[in-house]
Amino acid sequence: MDRVIYTAMSAASQVLNKQAITTHNLSNVSTVGFRAQLAALKAVPILGNDMPTRTMVTATTPTFDSTMGAFNYTGRELDVALAEDHWLAVQLPDGSEAYTRNGAIQVDEDGTLNIKGYPLIGDNGILTVPQRSQVSVSTDGTLTALGAGDQPTTIAQVGKIKRVHLERNEVIRGDDGFFRVTNEIRNTRGEVLPDNPDTLLMSGVLEGSNVNPVSAMVDLISHARQFEMQMKEISSADENAQKANQILSLT
């Protein structure tokens, strides 16, 4: 009976993990540039000195949905969107580089451009603009700024946003929502990737999340039913074990 119990237990545990992933995706249905996390399961037989008698369920390497989200017009100068397989680069607290599709660029009190609080990287490092200046972005990522009270003729270029081209299989998703390059890409192309001059930006537009809320809700219901089924298997196995013990006690 323990074979049935442990097999059902492993399946129930992975169903809970899938439910947590789906819940996380659903909570980010309105997050700019969010890529839905996917979970895949596989059967793994337990091998030993005897014949394999149990097959457990385990999660495979987590991946993400790479489909494009809907583009939403905002009209804000520092909202940008990119074509498929192109990314913006940000600097993490440890100094490493990460990538995102979130184009909602903000300016902090020091004039540093950032995304979700992480500095935005340009062609020459972290991008900064004069405080209280009016900033605009061109299609090639060039940043221009007009100081407060200055004449329109004094507009000047202050930097250029770094744009990176990476295929779907060249990046892995982190728990913080940012993406990193795979070890293979890091070994062949280096820790810091160069700017891609062919990438165009769309200013005043943001890419929305690619999570389908209806599908996510259906998945949650499916996960709940799968979990209940596994719990019923465990309960049935326990009842069978108790009845078997009763029969053995009579003999």
Image: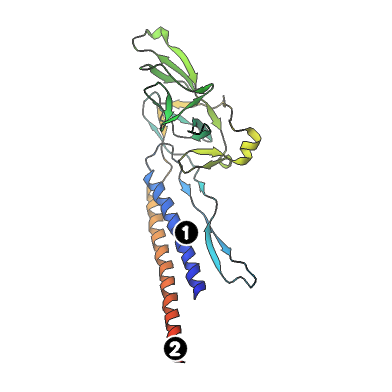
Residue 108 placement (x, y as % from top left): 38, 25
Q: In the shown orientation, is residue 190 left or right of residue 5?
A: right
Q: In the shown orientation, is residue 76 left or right of residue 159?
A: left
Mark 2 is surrounded, within 10 Å at the Cα level, by few (under 14), some (14 to 19) or many (20 or more) other residues, namely few
Where is residue 77, by image quadrant? Answer: top left
Where is residue 199, by image quadrant? Answer: top right
Residue 206 placement (x, y as % from top left): 41, 32
Can you tell which of label 2 and label 1 is closer to the viewer?
2
Q: In the shown orientation, is residue 88 left or right of residue 146?
A: right
Mark 2 element type? helix
Mark 1 element type? helix
Q: Residue furthest bottom?
A: 251
Query: Which of these two is toward me, 184 or 224?
Result: 184
Label of residue 14 in the image:
1
- Residue lying at 47% horizontally and 14% vertically, measured from the top left: 157
Query: Which of these two is toward me, 161 or 210?
Result: 161
- The residue indicated by pointer 2 is 249
**Residue type (three-letter) at the residue carrying disc 1:** Gln
Residue 83 placement (x, y as % from top left): 50, 32
Label of residue 106 in the image:
none
Q: In the displayed structure, would residue 86 be above or below residue 18?
A: above
Distance of mark 2 from mark 1, alpha carbons?
36 Å
- Residue lying at 37% horizontally and 50% vertically, measured from the top left: 214
**Residue type (three-letter) at the residue carrying disc 2:** Ser
- Residue lying at 38% horizontally and 17% vertically, measured from the top left: 131
Q: In the displayed structure, would residue 36 be above or below residue 130?
A: below
First-in-chain label (2 vs 1): 1
Contact between marks 2 and 1 (CB within 8 A): the answer is no
- Residue lying at 41% horizontally and 40% vertically, measured from the top left: 209
Residue 46 placement (x, y as % from top left): 59, 66
Camera sees residue 212: no
Query: Which of these two is toward me, 64 or 240?
Result: 240
